[in-house]
Amino acid sequence: MRLRSGFPAPASRWIATPALALLALLTLGAGGPGITVTGVRSWPAPANTRVVFDLTGAVTLVAPDSGRTVELAVTVPGVVVARGGDVPDHLTVGDGVVDSVEIVTGDFGARFHLWFRDTTSFRVFTLDPEADKPFRVVVDVARPGAEAAEIQRLAGIAAEKRLERVRIIVIDAGHGGEDAGARGPGGVLEKRVTLGVATALATELESESGIRTVLTRDGDYFIPLRDRYRIAEKVKADLFMSIHANSSKRRGRGNGTEVYFLSQRGASDQADSDLASLENAADLVGGVPPEAEDDLVSILYDVKRASAMQQSQLLAESLLEHVSADRRLESRGVKQAGFMVLKSVEFPSVLVEVAFINNPYEASLLKNPAFQKQMAKQLATGVKAYLQRAGLVRPTGGTQEEARN
């Protein structure tokens, strides 16, 4: 494990190409006197490690915004910076991507010095305060070879579908990493609940002959919304399910389960619109730049979208029918809203709001592993019923010879 200190290496060690500017003013204006570093943490993921520094105000950074290096220094000049009492001056990460982090603060400002295991790509940016998140300095460090390995893995799953004639179901555990999602009483976090239900659902479905599951995430890390459904597209998925936990603005008043499919014409009502806006804001929390929507949509695309939405409604109805068997939760119906994660036209897609995490009773259920498994079992039953109704599997679970590839 390497742990080094000292001032930044020469610029030639920071940046691999001269096209990258050394000075990256990622936020306009210094934050004034009295800035404090209140937290530092790392989020290891299959593709990268994210290191996040929390600050009490906006600052100007001097650093390369991206490049390749084995060590990196990010400097905050021109403002007095203090280090909070719970923030260490050194953080050992040691996850195979980032070795360690050093934090130096004082009258001169601050310096965040990071050492990587190998020479690799990185990206530096800032995030404005969002919900309960403060101003943040973020460094994303790529895991060498991870992108190529992931492409090969997903291609292998798609090939398995063709050869073995299995049905591929992609299960998306909402939120993750820096994006905790909604919070319930007693510190219940949506990102943990969704991963518990998604993992249990994958286990339940894998026990069925002819079904293969893929989790968009299997740990506590952030994935952009579009990347979630693109994983499903790359494996030629037969359907996509995103698992979430709802939260009402009226403390403790919301209750029950609802299942959504995509709406191109607006949400079912204002509450559904607000919920979609909240879930779509995950990319803002995670620091993903917006992408322009393609205004030129082909006739073929329109036909595929109409078919996918029709099948999505059937899937949503099947899921809710079987979830409603659990009398502990009220059925809130099948609804539509413009969730970003449902926007692929390649397969039926639904978003399941399992229960209300801010409702004390339902929060106690959501954090219970036994309830998570029971919910997963009911969802799995709904999935299998849909596959049979859609003619994608035999009633006994075997794949039909005539089923589509």
Image: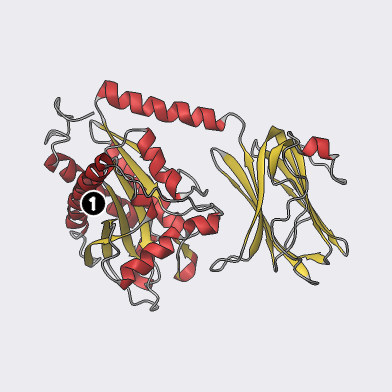
**Which residue is painted at 50% across and 53% down in the image?**
290
The answer to which image quadrant residue 25 occupies is bottom right
- Display coloring: secondary structure
Q: Position of residue 215 (x, y in %)?
A: 39, 41
**Which residue is painted at 31% across and 36% down in the image?**
237
Decide if residue 194 is on the left or right side of residue 391: right
Q: Residue furthest front?
A: 296
Q: Position of residue 173 (x, y in %)?
A: 40, 50
Q: Residue furthest top?
A: 163
Decide if residue 275 is on the left or right side of residue 142: left
**Which residue is painted at 28% across and 53% down in the image?**
374
One can see residue 179 in this view: no
The answer to which image quadrant residue 355 occupies is bottom left
- At numbered mark 1, what does the secondary structure look like: helix, strand or loop? helix
Q: Position of residue 221 (x, y in %)?
A: 52, 48
- Position of the C terminus, as image quadrant, is top left
Against 316, residue 28 (above or below) is: below
Label 1 sits on what residue type?
A: Gln
**Which residue is painted at 32% across and 60% down in the image?**
353
| Residue position for label 1 | 378
The answer to which image quadrant residue 117 occupies is top right
